[in-house]
Amino acid sequence: MYKQSLYKVLDNHIKPKIINRMNRYKKWKYGYNKEHDIVVISKTGEVGEIYEIQNLKIALPKAKNIHKFDNDKWTKFEYPKSLSRIKTVFDWRQYPEDFKTKWYDYIDNEFTRREEGFWFYNKSVPTYISGTHYMYLQWSKIDVGAPDFRESNRLFFIFWEACKADSRSYGMCYLKNRRSGFSFMASGEVVNLATISSDSRYGILSKSGPDAKKMFTDKVVPISVNYPFFFKPTQDGMDRPKTELAYRVPASKFTRRSITITTDADETLQDLQGLDTTIDWKNTGDNSYDGEKLKLLVHDESGKWEKPNNILNNWRVTKTTLRLGSRIIGKCMMGSTSNALDKGGRNFKKLYDESDVTKRNRNGQTSSGLYSLFIPMEWNYEGYIDSYGIPVFDTPDTEVFGPQGESIDLGVIEYWENEVEGLKENQDALNEFYRQFPRTTKHAFRDESKSSLFNLTKIYQQIDFNEDQNNKTLVTQGNFMWQNGIKDTRVLFSPSNQGRFFVTWVPDTHLQNRYIEKNGIKYPGNEHIGAFGCDPYDISGTVDKRGSNGALHGLTKFSMENAPADHFFLEYIARPQTAEIFFEDVLMACVFYGMPILAENNKPRLLYHFKRRGYRGFAMNRPDKLRNKLSVTEREIGGIPNSSEDIKQAHAAAIESYIETAVGFNGDTYGDVYFQRTLEDWAAFDINNRTTHDASISSGLALMACNKNRYAPVSRRKRDPIDLGIKKYDNRGSLSKIIK
């Protein structure tokens, strides 16, 4: 059975007595509450449940005045016919006072719901939707008419409200599946905010200028046109403009008070103050909206900006339009599926990764300033959402119906898996399906197989197989340690959920800690079984605190021992607090397995650590040179440089060959590389930018170490035959002949 993990309710994040006391005096303020590390989206001074959505803690309003629809689910309220005939506030003012008095409460109620949100029973469960979500459901017109209520959209709007409330946030970066309704929801929000804001500018960008224009003309303008008169300022210009929607004089920032003022017709225009608010769109480019001040920027299809356009460059520019100095005065609503990495997806992925709310600078902001949100496809897939707006995750045992009364007899998970199974023979088609309908962020950022140096088809086959096999049961996490804490004794492996090592095989006891000592120097006792490759680092900390990780991989050879052949059995990709911890981690792993290590020597502190501790025999020399051709340093500590072009090519070729033979589906079975991080690093490997691929470097060196004979130098000295004066004869026939 599917278990949702999109959000959770935090029951004990704040003590109930504190909540009750603050609620009694309505002391909760809309915005970020530093004391309790929550974002309060309540505008009533009272809070109820606290949601955690993608690590952001959000305090909802306290439940009150919960509406009960006759069918126990969201139903759009019918707009009274007598009001629907009124097109503008000027028409309203011509009506007699007794008519207007009849509708004051109705209009008041709509303004309150717009501001505070709305509570209703959904399948008998009290359910909260934000004011923006209410406006979208009740007053927005989309391509199918009125939008359906969906639980996924409810959580989206709650998260968006938190982004608006949080003074540290520039908005959201939303990673979505196709046909999730983002464009309509964003269009609804831009109209909602623009019609209550004065002296403000609202902008729209998309993957191209025509796309931005289409969003404006086909979504934004119709939503604005269909607003009721009491929410709709009078437009300046055409009813359905092509480039700019302007709420200028004689528009007004409408409140109940402003629409109930009775004035003479000739005084009306004089009394009203204009909003002077506009909504427009721009052509796609790095400098779109540069130098302007925006209240809201809608960034649609931001994962599909192709060269020469660059979403990262554009965001660096447009980010400045949303702030005055350190004060954030506007927000960005960014959302998209992702293209292949070299078609705009890589930049969007970087922006998404830099929007993680758990990674903040000292100002409390993420690197991008945005907050990332990912909603898996199973939450928002057309045809698999029931009449209550709840996703049908698992195939139902009883009859379930959709919003239009259609029967749903299959769960969305099973449907998705069936689609995946049918595309496994076409990797590029499968990757495109993953990007369009992702269940994980890894699916969303799948690349095209033709863009990778290595066989991406096989790599993704292996990744998917590992996920299907519940990879956690195949891999054990833990740490190595010296017995009783005494160095250079015996190394033990201890499983731990916080461990830095991931292992799939541990040698039999008699093979553990095997070494040979010669002249006070220790040598590995299991060199015939396997070897390690390592990409080290030298410095404990870096200026940006984002230095590359140290990486270590263990690989077996074919041997007569009880060990799997040609198998990556250990993965270590970490950067402990000090370099010394890393050095000792690597040393202990080598000692425990009794295997040598081939490490890059451009950062030599690791190799010096081995030498000082008496383990120089574990450090392999570069296999492509004879000992007498090694440099002084190479003879002293071993290792292999990473600067040589020949080494780079040999290293990449080693990984390529291994992937072809041991990764993915090979006719009968799947490979046994169970380290997902390593597989993903291979998939993204760039031979011209190797520094960011620690896992690829160390795993490639492990392959070279286990196959060192392939790289042994060939002697160039020509050996002439020595004439010993002995002749050989061919005795066939009647006469013997000298063989020359």
Image (tube, rainbow, N blue to C red):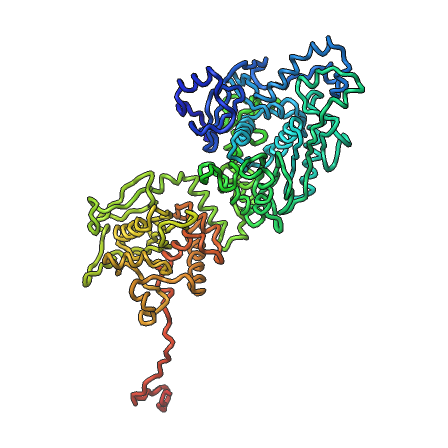
- What residue occupies the far right of the structure in this picture? 266
Q: Residue at x 33, y 70 (%)?
A: 626
> Hey, which quadrant is residue 65 in on the image?
top right
Left or right relative to 173: residue 254: right
333 shown above or below 432: above
Taking the image as drawn, is residue 78 in sight?
yes
Q: Residue at x 68, y 24 (%)?
A: 253
Q: Residue at x 63, y 26 (%)?
A: 147
739 shown above or below 179: below
Between 713 and 601, the one nearer to me in the picture: 601
Q: Quadrant of the N terminus?
A: top left
Between 586 and 1, the one nearer to me in the picture: 586
88 shown above or below 559: above
Residue 503 in picture, x, y percent from top left: 33, 46
Residue 623 in picture, x, y percent from top left: 35, 65
Left or right relative to 86: residue 352: left
